[in-house]
Image (tube, grey):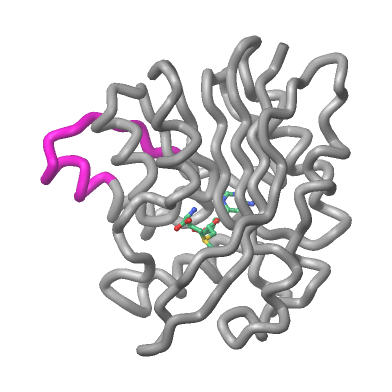
Amino acid sequence: MTDDMWTAEFWDERYSSSERIWSGAPNPHLVDVVGGLVPGSAVDIGCGEGADVLWLAHRGWRATGVDLSQVALDRGAARAAQEGVEATWLQADLLAETLPEQYDLVSAHFVHVPTQLFAPLYTRLGAAVAPGGSLLVVGHHPHDVETEVRHHHGDDILFTPDRVVGLLDPQHWDVRRADAPTRTQRVEDADVTVTDTVVHAVRR
Ligand SMILES: C[S@@+](CC[C@H](N)C(=O)[O-])C[C@H]1O[C@@H](n2cnc3c(N)ncnc32)[C@H](O)[C@@H]1O
């Protein structure tokens, strides 16, 4: 981890270093959790190159992708045009800015911030969920610090389901899922078992 990981410059440089950084496939927990929901408005926070936004848009969601990196957003927009789907792409720093509206789904996959910024960020994302809507937060679990794939992450960056659930007032949230499933990820020609934090909560 480096101190400039929270800047648009860092992420623009990271995305510019390669034609494509991520797989281009939607995240499996998004497909699993959101596949069963009725489409409405959705925002994907830290959407990167937009695979999750496109998956949502293809399934009838009015999908918005938000990211720090304009380079990544431009990639998502180009792919949406190629695939003939509509989506909105918004450059914003969610550590500093509030989302412009509420959504039926707020999804964030693998957006990791230092401990002191965790509560402000994820509380803000919760506030952007419309009544009856869903918050889906997926992250790398601290177990993964032990594995080769995430050896460069400090364990204060990764988070457990409890950290997310602890921010959700039970009077206002129905936590439908809070667990840490494992999956196999292909890394440099090897299969590695990784653990994800998955929290799905519905706003009352
Ligand atoms: C590890 S990538 C995950 C990308 C995508 N969600 C995925 O699962 O493939 C984290 C993304 O979060 C974005 N990001 C990091 N901090 C952010 C912030 N404060 N506001 C908006 N986006 C941010 C980065 O630009 C990057 O694209």
Front residue of 187 and 122: 187
Q: Position of residue 83 (x, y in %)?
A: 13, 42
Image-based side of 43 in relation to 99, left or right: left
Q: Is residue 190 above or below residue 53?
A: below
The quadrant of the rendering that contains the C terminus is top right
Residue at 46% from the left image edge and 42% from the top image edge: 30
Magenta region includes residue 83: yes
Q: Residue at image x 79%, y 62%? A: 114
Q: Quadrant of ligand 1?
A: bottom right
Q: What span is colored magenta in the figure?
A: 77-90
Of residues 14 and 176, the one nearer the viewer is 176
Horizontal placement of 17 versus 33: left or right? Answer: left
For residue 125, above or below residue 202: below
Queried whether the magenta region covers residue 182, the answer comes back as: no
Q: Would you identify the image quadrant in which residue 189 lies?
A: bottom left
Residue at horizontal 26%, vertical 73%?
19
Compared with 156, 169 (above or below) is above
Q: Is residue 49 above or below residue 102?
A: below
Q: Position of residue 69 (x, y in %)?
A: 47, 57
Across and down, in percent, residue 45 comes to 54, 43
Quadrant the N terminus occupies:
bottom right
- Answer with left or right where residue 178 lies relative to residue 133: right
Image position, residue 10 (x, y; %):
55, 71
In the foreground, 131 or 8: 131
